[in-house]
Structure formats: structure tokens, C-alpha cells
Amino acid sequence: MKILLVEDDETTREGMVDVIDLMLPDAEILTSGDPDTASQLIETFRQAIDIIIADGHLGKHRREGLLLLEQARKTGIANLIFFSGQSIDEDEKKPDIHYLQKGTDPVNLERLLQQISSTSGVKYQPPL
């Protein structure tokens, strides 16, 4: 499984990598700190990326992560997670994007990965 994690805060990005690595030790995790690099990774690996987790607020632009996920969806990547410390209004949510609040219990990420696994071809192996 290949996961792209897009988070501009290095500490948060490293922490998320550690959590995902515990949950999915066999996953390959690509990381990016900005939307431009993330777009390049999506273009290069779009056939291989199973899940994208993107921070909602990347750099100076609010909702840049959501725009990135919408672009990724157009390339055929179906498992998209919007990860933000800011709330998002229900009317702004897209039905085919999963939403996860920053600072939430890692169990919520685990449940979301299980949900994605049950509705797609992505294989999730819970930690022992």
C-alpha cells in the first residue's frame, strides 16, 4: 500500500508518519510539505497511490488541501482524507472525501482506514 501524506507542519507530519507506520507497517509512506510537491508526487505515482491524507490548511492558503484532494480525485485516486485542525461546514464537504479532525484520537484514523479498506480494494491489516 502506498500513502501520500501532505502536511506543512514538520512535527505533525513526522508524528502522522509514526502513527501510520504503527498501523500499517508494510505501507510505503510518501510525504510532502507543500501542495506543489504533492501535485508532482500525485502525477508521478497516481497509478500506485492508494490513499492521500492532506492537511486542509497548507501554507498561506485556506482549504488548499481540499483543492489538492479534488485534483487527485480527477486522476482516479479514490481514497482521500481531509485532515484539518479547523472545522469545515457541512455544506463544504464533498461526499467522496473522508474528513478527520487534527488532534483526534489515533483510533479515529484507524477506524477510517478500516472503513476505506472495507469499501475499496485497499488492504488494511490492524496492528497486532
Image (cartoon, rainbow, N blue to C red):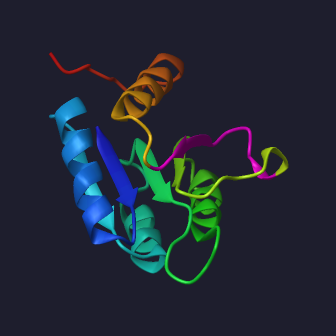
- Location of the N terminus by quadrant is top left
- Choose between 98 and 100: the one closer to the eye: 100
Q: Specify the quadrant of the image occupied by residue 71.
A: bottom right
- Choose between 71 and 55: the one closer to the eye: 55
Residue bounds of the magenta highlight:
92-102
Q: Specify the quadrant of the image occupied by residue 8.
A: bottom left
- Choose between 118 and 33: the one closer to the eye: 33
Q: Specify the quadrant of the image occupied by residue 67.
A: bottom right
From the viewer's perspective, tell me whether residue 115 is left or right of residue 11: right
From the viewer's perspective, tell me whether residue 87 is left or right of residue 20: right
Q: Which residue of the protein is positioned furthest toward the bottom in this rendering?
A: 60
Tell me what residue is drawn at x 60 percent, y 58 percent. Answer: 86
- Choose between 46 and 25: the one closer to the eye: 25
Counting from the top left corner in percent of width and height, residue 25 is at: 15, 34
Tell me what residue is drawn at x 36 percent, y 54 percent. Answer: 4
Residue 91 visible somewhere in the drawing: yes
Residue 24 visible somewhere in the drawing: no
Counting from the top left corner in percent of width and height, residue 89 is at: 78, 50
Counting from the top left corner in percent of width and height, residue 114 is at: 42, 21
Q: Is residue 117 above or below residue 59?
A: above
